[in-house]
Amino acid sequence: MENRFGLKDLFVIILLILLILSVWLAMKQFDRQWKDVQEVKTSVGELTGEQARLRNQISELRRLIQSGVRVNDSAAAGDTPEQYDPFEGVRAAREKEGFAQGDWCIDVFGTNVSIITALTYKDLYGRLIQAQVLESLITIDPNTLENVPQIAESWKIQDNSDAWRQYMDQATEKFAKQADADASVFTEQLKKLVSKIEGDSGPVAEGSEQYKALTAKARQQWIDAQIDADPNRPPATVITFKLRDDVVFSDGAPLTAEDVVFTWELLNNPKLDAASTRQFYDNIETCKALGKYEVQFGMTEPHYMALSMCGGRPVLPKHFYSKYTIDQINRMPGLLMGTGPYRLPDPAAWAPGKPLELVRNERYWGPQGGFDKLVYREIINDVARVTAFKNGEIDMLAPTPEQFESLKDDPAVAERTQHFVYQSIPTGYMWLAWQQKRSDKPTMFADKRVRQAMTYLTERRRICDDVFHGYATPAMGPWPKGSKQADPSLEPRPYDPEKGKALLAEVGWKDRDGDGVLENAEGKPFQFTLTYPSGSADYDRIALFLKDSYAKAGIVMELDPLEFSVLIQRLEQQTFDAIILRWGGGAVESDIRQMFHSSQANKGGDNVMNYISPELDRLIDKARSTVNPDERYPLWQECHRILYDDQPYTFMLYQKSLRMFDKRIANIQRNKMGLNDPPRNEWYVPAPLQKWGK
């Protein structure tokens, strides 16, 4: 059959050629547009960097002209320096011969991080992330331990305590007379108190001593409520901050007094899931903007940490967080934007399971630090973390004492690493909490003799030596010996199993059937469950050690290791028998209200063991409102004696910090707070040693 090429075929070929040509031209055009977009992106990035450099040059010029900032403070915070540069450490790092920008810093967490959202975070890991991103009006100088300026350039404290005390005396007398003249005014308070007691332990008879005590408490609650609601009540302390006018958030928006006020209002919204954070600031009654760069706080009563409470909170951007409802903020795990040297690539997109990375804030208002990126890996298993460190997959490690001893003596590891052993100020501690109430009913640990017995049965010195290789000492309370808050006469309770068993026998716990297990009068065995973080060799060894020690005394302890995010939920709901954890160091002079005041014995609060002591409450409240340190420290020491006697925790130990780093990271330095981190903008890697992000 003949194959003929017709006009129709020619037309199809021409169309095909035209189509190919059109596609080729479109691709060329797209390629040109893509290059244009990249050039625009590069230009924008260069412009952002240039703006940041210009802003830093202006700030540096201002610093040189002013030679620092002048600060007006009072005895509420101690003496403060007349001049202060918040970036002295970064400037010193940048002047070192080997300083270079670039590289990444690869850190590691021994748990899966669940929340890093500002204010609603639940643990140390969220706080560590936020410390690189958020900043506050003031901070603590890590060498002098004094309050110093950060976002604020100056402050003024007005002590109004005399007028406040005069008002309180007069108002208390006035409302007390009203309550005594007409007891019906506090009927609602009394009904609530009686109802709660009857729900816990049965009817309360009118005229009984218990009813009289509840009546007195209801009367006082009503008086306090009237005083709190009185618009004429003067503030006890007024603190006015003057803000810097060159601070911007990571998206370039300027920080103003409105952002400070917004942060305070957000934190004080009772619907925000931030109960443990909110309680620390509950003495702040008012926060108002006096101008674009001036803000004023009023305190409900005198407080020794007034300056830290008002100025130490991170400042959040109103224009960003106000876009979200309270419910959204509570539900979103990665809502984080601030003014700090690092930022999330997307301030709203992080979620558990996603890579946890912070990038350099090119718009930062201070001098730029070394690293381009901070990376946080999540490796639950202790051995796996050590392997990653030995292989150079991570740059730092907080090893267990056993791992530390092994690694520092390994020539291959020692050659390329540097290590630090230090006891920071303030000192954190490990604690074992005994739950005193479950389902509104007292537990076996409600009697303090049982708690005392458990401490006598806990061989803490051996745990310090065998588990922590001597890098820990037995604790005697929330403050170590030598602290001005600690009673100098107290010593850690010794390991004394005979005394422990005698105390348990006093309460009625005896081996009644010869099976080696203690029982109460009803025949119920002394049995409980210990909850602790999984994946930690230290916690595993401690738990097994305790199980064996308690078994020798006739106590059955079951083990309940939990992944950390699950453990935090159990902690918040207070659904545990006993739990062992650590508190990190807080303020230099720590406030124990968060952990031991009865007002915090609610779900979501940090008095997780439902410990109630009216006398301790009174002393804590009095100590917090006593500005004179010579009068305040004896009050803390009284608190220490009560905690020592009541043993709401078995205060386990004070542990030294053990850290190891890749030797290529330069300028890691010791200070009174520990190391010069956070933030991590004083560390750097010399250019020839940089390895990540190339």
Image: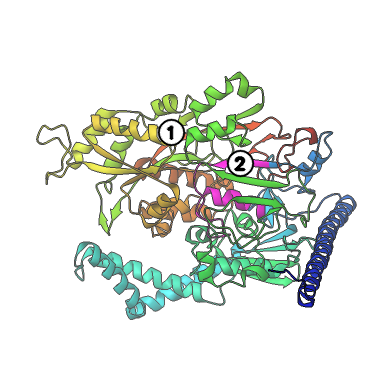
Q: In this view, does 40 lie to the left or right of 676?
A: right
Image spot of residue 445 (x, y percent): 28, 46
| Residue at position x 42%, y 46% in the image | 563
Position of residue 367 measured from the top left corner of the image (x, y, whole percent): 80, 49
Residue that mark 2 sits on: 107
- Few, some or many C-alpha atoms within 10 Å of disc 2 (few <14, some 14-19, many ≥20)? some
Q: Name the residue under label 1.
A: 537
Looking at the image, residue 581 lies above or below residue 217: above
Per the model, the C-alpha gap separating discs 2 and 1 is 19 Å
Q: Return the residue nearer the eye: 205 or 287.
A: 287
- Provide the secondary structure element on which disc 2 rests: strand
Residue 120 lies in magenta, yes or no? Answer: yes
Residue 37, percent from left and from top: 81, 63
Q: Is tag 2's residue or tag 1's residue first in the polypeptide sequence?
A: 2
Q: Which amino acid does the dot numbered 1 rest on? A: Ala
Part of the protein shown in magenta: 105-133
| Count of numbered marks | 2
Between residue 453 and residue 488, name the one nearer to us.
Answer: 453
Classify mark 1: residues with Cα within 10 Å, few (<14), some (14-19) or many (20+).
Answer: some
